Amino acid sequence: MKTNKTVEILVGLFVAAALLALFFLAMKVSNLGALDTSETYRVTARFDNIGSLKEKAPVKMAGVEVGRVSHIGFDQARYQAVVELAIYKKFDQIPDDTFAKILTAGLLGEQYVGLEPGGSDTYLKEGGEIDVTQSAMVLEEVIGQFIFEKAGERKK
Amino acid sequence: MTGWLARLGAGWIRAVRHLGRALLLLLRILEGIDELIRRPRLLVEQLFSVGVLTVLIIAVSGLFVGMVLSLQGYHILSQFKADSALGVMVAASLLRELGPVVTALLFSGRAGSALTAEIGLMKATEQLSGLEMMAVDPVRRVLTPRFMAGFLAMPLLAALFSALGVIGGWFVGVGLLGVDDGTWWVQMQARIDWHQDLLNGIIKSLVFGWVCTWIAVFQGYNCLPTSAGVSGATTRTVVHSSLAVLGLDFVLTALMIK
């Protein structure tokens, strides 16, 4: 058996190394380090179809992440999806006639909300609503439409 | 026919009796925790022999498992032009499954068998009876620190395993195979959830640490005090721990997965 001091130092090193590994896993590997805990304000947008958009999906403007999808609900009166977006407070100059659409990263990638700025002088605020939206592209519908058009052409 | 039935019944009764004894021993071990709080030295000594001495094999295996995962994953993923997802694949498989499970298997082979052999030999050479003669409870003095050390060391070892695995995978994927460094980390952070992947992995390794050391300590304390008894108990420790880990892993995964 080694002397008590050496044992204590080695155990201390072991625990410290393991905690460092845990810290590395949390901050560098998982999304804990990337979670933006900065202040946000919430705006809602209604879509006819959100495809497979999920909560926590990024909200991007010109490709830059400006927020996250915080909640997805369903409006029974209008049969629309109500998507709540949490926009980071530092992006506080987004025009209130901004256009929101659901896009896909790559052909098979995950879906996100893309914002395109309008020209208004007033900006979106907490509780605001984005009026102009475009639904997600559903691949089956696009293919169906394509086949339908082709069939129509042949009849002529 | 009746002989066959009787053997089945006897085996079943033996198994239940074993389980009951193991549970009673566990309760006595947990009762001894107050002694551990008064004398943390006992825990530190056991953390050394259970934790520190296991670090080497865990670190080397973690590194190589990560490297192999990266190598294998790259050749499959690059067929679909999806090698940007290599980091996600390596990190997810390590954090969710390989980290906790392989660490527990290695732990029962390296530390669990040593625990059983040590306690078994103490029993065979009547050191445990000697302690009792001096009015020292061998369960509190010998078993409790070993059990708690194993329980605490397992998640730490699993974290080391996973972290080194990710680094090993990064070395092969980014360093040797030419996956983009930025893509590797960004995709990983975007897809690996700290709650769903990291925390569940830690919970798994806590359960495995509990079960593996429980089995090791029980087998040592319960063995026949002969050389054959100690060797049989050591073998049983490794076999039972491995089977328990693999079975529990499936149950835990089924409970955790959404």
Image (cartoon, coloured by chain):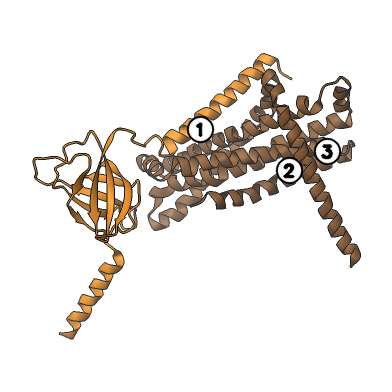
Residue on which the image places disc 2: B238
Chain letter belonging to callout 1 = A
C-alpha distance separating marks 2 and 3 = 15 Å
Question: What amino acid does circle 3 point to?
Answer: Asn
C-alpha distance separating marks 3 and 1 = 36 Å
Left or right side of B106 for A22: left
* Chain B colour as displayed: brown
In percent of the image, x 30 and y 52: which residue is there? A105
Residue A92 percent across, percent down from the top left: 19, 36
Residue on which the image places disc 1: A22
Question: Badge 1, how many Cα within 10 Å: few under 14, some, many 20+?
Answer: many
- A24 or B86: nearer the eye? A24
Question: What amino acid does circle 1 point to?
Answer: Leu
Residue B222: which numbered mark, if any? 3
Q: State if disc 3 and disc 2 touch (CB < 8 Å).
A: no
In percent of the image, x 56 and y 45: which residue is there? B98
